[in-house]
Image (cartoon, rainbow, N blue to C red):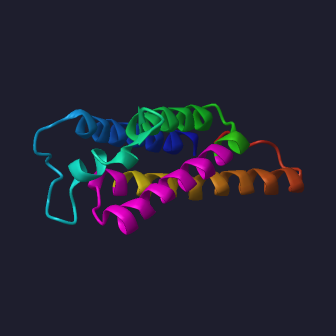
Amino acid sequence: MRYLILVLGIAGAVVSGLALQVHYSTATEPCSINAHWDCGVVNHSPFAVLHGVPVAAIGIAGYLMIAALGFFRQRFALMLAVIAAFCFALRLTFIEELVLEVWCLYCVISQTIIALLLVLSVGWVAAEYRRLRSGLPSSVS
């Protein structure tokens, strides 16, 4: 399980890195598909920065932290971090849908990754809780 979380965390950091590149770019983006799918519009909006820091940079740091927590089997801390990240990403998704009315392909991929991480982290904590309640020895996953 920890390697799957590690891989998803790294994938999320890569996707966030691509979004950060769009944030600083002035060229036409490869994900500029049509009026409803344009990463440039989303990543150049006022919502793409939080207290002077690009949201994509926050995403890179968050995904790397999630990957490290998963790798070092910090199940409960991982779950809390993923829940917080999911809520933050969900807020950004609502902004894309309701305020900007434009979707960023990288953001949608990131939202999918964080949703998968949410399911995995909650499942991992639940499995550990069941194991502890039953008195079974610790697993190596």
Q: Nearer the viewer, residue 78 or 102?
A: 102
- Provide residue 16's location: percent of width, then percent of height: 36, 40
Please tell me which residue is depicted at 49% across the width and 59% down the height of the picture. Answer: 90
Measuring 14% from the left and 63% from the top, which residue is drawn there? 34
- Residue sitting nearer the eye, 103 or 66: 103
As drawn, is 18 to the left or to the right of 92? Answer: left
From the image, which quarter does the C terminus lie in?
A: top right
- Which x, y percent locates residue 1? 57, 46
Q: Image check: 78 left or right of 103?
A: right
Please tell me which residue is depicted at 35% across the width and 57% down the height of the picture: 108
Number of marks present in the image shown: 0
Q: Position of residue 125 (x, y in %)?
A: 72, 51
Write the residue at 48% across / 32% down.
61
Relative to 140, say whether 95 is above or below. Answer: below
Please report the bounds of the magenta region as a residue range. Answer: 79-108
Q: Is residue 139 left or right of residue 132?
A: left
Residue 39 falls inside the magenta stretch = no
Farthest left residue in view: 28
Location of residue 81 (image quadrant): top right
Picture quadrant of residue 93: bottom left
Q: Is residue 9 above or below residue 95?
A: above
Is 85 covered by the magenta stretch? yes
Front residue of 29/123: it is 29
Most prominent secondary structure in the magenta stretch?
A: helix
